[in-house]
Amino acid sequence: MNQGIVHVLLFEARTDNEGIHSLEVQGKTVVLMFENKDDAERYCGLLEAQDFPKPSVEPIESEEIIKFCLEAGYEAKHVPKGFIPENEEDRLMLAPPELNRDVSNWSDEDIKTNQDEKYENLASDKLDEIRKKLEGLI
């Protein structure tokens, strides 16, 4: 990959609540680094068409994004100009997945709380199911 400027997708850029667009791919968090600004802007438009908050396209040094990803445990994925996908995973570098995670609030505490609530609801549903089975045995 050429060192230099790449384009990333940021939510609420240059604010205290800034977030970077990422994908979950095979258990890894992937940040896309677009070589071509037009490709990045097209990706933003596709996100917006899915009722996803529209990020802004921000130019940044590729080394800075790579360093950020390493520190955060993410993978930086370079999307070269004229990129042609060879498989389903590659397709995600040109078009977002059909299902996206809600990013209306992406602080770690909120994500943990949302995961805890989902787990509690699932556990409650499972307990009800087990309770009904046991009652049926009596």
Image: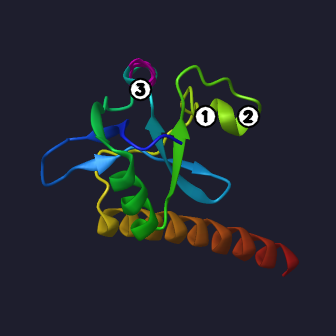
Prevailing secondary structure class for the magenta stretch in the rendered image: helix
Q: What scheme was used to colour the molecule?
A: rainbow
Q: Look at the numbered disc 3 and give the secondary structure of its residue.
A: helix
Residue 37 in the figure: left or right of residue 101? left
Amino acid carrying mark 2 in the image: Glu
Q: How far, Cα to Cα, is label 3 from label 1?
A: 12 Å
Please provide the residue range marked out in magenta: 38-45
Q: Residue at x 79, y 79 (%)?
A: 134
Q: CA distance from mark 2 to mark 3?
A: 19 Å
Quadrant in the rendering for residue 11? top left
Q: Position of residue 128 (x, y in %)?
A: 65, 70
Mark 2 and 1 residues: CB-CB less than 8 Å, in contact?
A: yes
- Which x, y percent locates residue 38? 40, 18
Q: Amino acid at mark 1?
A: Leu
Q: Is residue 102 toward the left or the right of residue 99 in the image?
A: left
* Residue at which label 1 appears: 92
Residue bearing the label numbered 2: 88
- Marks 2 and 3 close (CB-CB < 8 Å): no
Q: At 58% from the left edge and 30% from the top edge, which residue is drawn?
A: 98
In percent of width and height, residue 107 lies at 29, 61
Looking at the rendered structure, the secondary structure element under dot 1 is loop
Residue sitting at 59 percent across and 65 percent down? 122
The secondary element bearing badge 2 is classed as helix
Q: Which residue is mark 3?
A: 40
Is 39 a magenta residue? yes
Q: Quadrant of residue 56?
A: top left
Q: Give the vertical position of 34 relative to 134 (above or below).
A: above
Tell us which disc is closer to us: 3 or 1. Answer: 3
